[in-house]
Image (tube, rainbow, N blue to C red):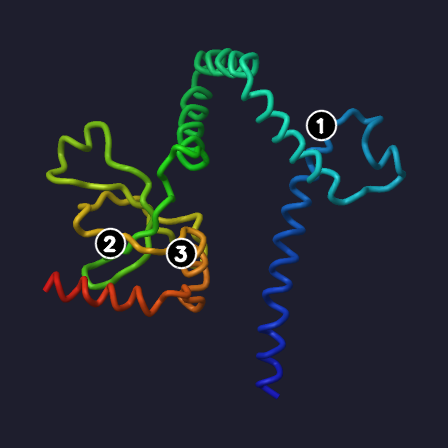
Amino acid sequence: MKKYFITGLLVLVPLFITIWVVGTLIQTMDQSLQLLPAAWQPKQLFGFHVPGLGVILTLLIIFVTGLVATNIFGQRLIVWWELLLSRVPFVKSIYSSVKQVSDTLFSNSGHAFRKAVLVQYPRLGSWTIAFITGTPGGDVVNHLTGDYISVYVPTTPNPTSGFFLMMPKADVIELEMGVDEALKYIISMGTVAPKDTLTQQLRFQQTQQKSL
């Protein structure tokens, strides 16, 4: 009896969570329909709400924005828009901070979250997976001796929260593991191991032996 119940949970829980996440995402993106005039609302045109139309509209807005931003006129428009926001108190600091983060994360030239590493946290002897976000800057560099890198240590099972650390580069072990694979490993709390776990374990043991 217990065996069948656990088997049912293993089948249904991932399914229900997936449906919930997808449903919430679609429901959120459907809010973009509010940007349309009242006469163009699907409920007015068809007499009922059509789930998913907001997703199409959202993707279309993102695509058109990217298309406009890549030409000369769009680039000038963005410069004008940023100059306008830079003169608004409080809004300036929020926009500039968010833009710097988004440029770092989503830009093809950025290096943030492009590499998974192994670090000792929260104490020596305890290891966890982190992601390289860059190198320390500003006045921080004047107080650090040696070669340091910045890393983000995500929490489990929610990787959107975590800790920002600046660690000596010598104490960080780069992993031959993709970011997606590392995130899956973190979210699953280590239950979904990467395919090349055995190779990584041998390499990790060799690194520990060398450090000793």
Residue type at mark 3 is Ala
Check disc 2 and report its element: helix, strand or loop.
strand
Marks 2,1: beta carbons within 8 A:
no
In-image side of 21 versus 57 (left or right)? left
Residue that numbered label 3 is attached to: 182
Marks 1,3: beta carbons within 8 A:
no
When asked about the image quadrant of residue 73, the answer is top right
Name the residue at 81% across, 32% down.
Answer: 41
Name the residue at 26% across, 45% down.
Answer: 165
Residue that numbered label 2 is attached to: 173
Residue that numbered label 1 is attached to: 35
Q: Is residue 200 above or below residue 101?
A: below
Comparing 203 with 25, the one in front is: 203
In-image side of 100 versus 71 (left or right)? left
In-image side of 185 versus 145 (left or right)? right
Residue 75: percent from the left, percent from the top? 51, 16
Check disc 3 and report its element: helix, strand or loop.
helix
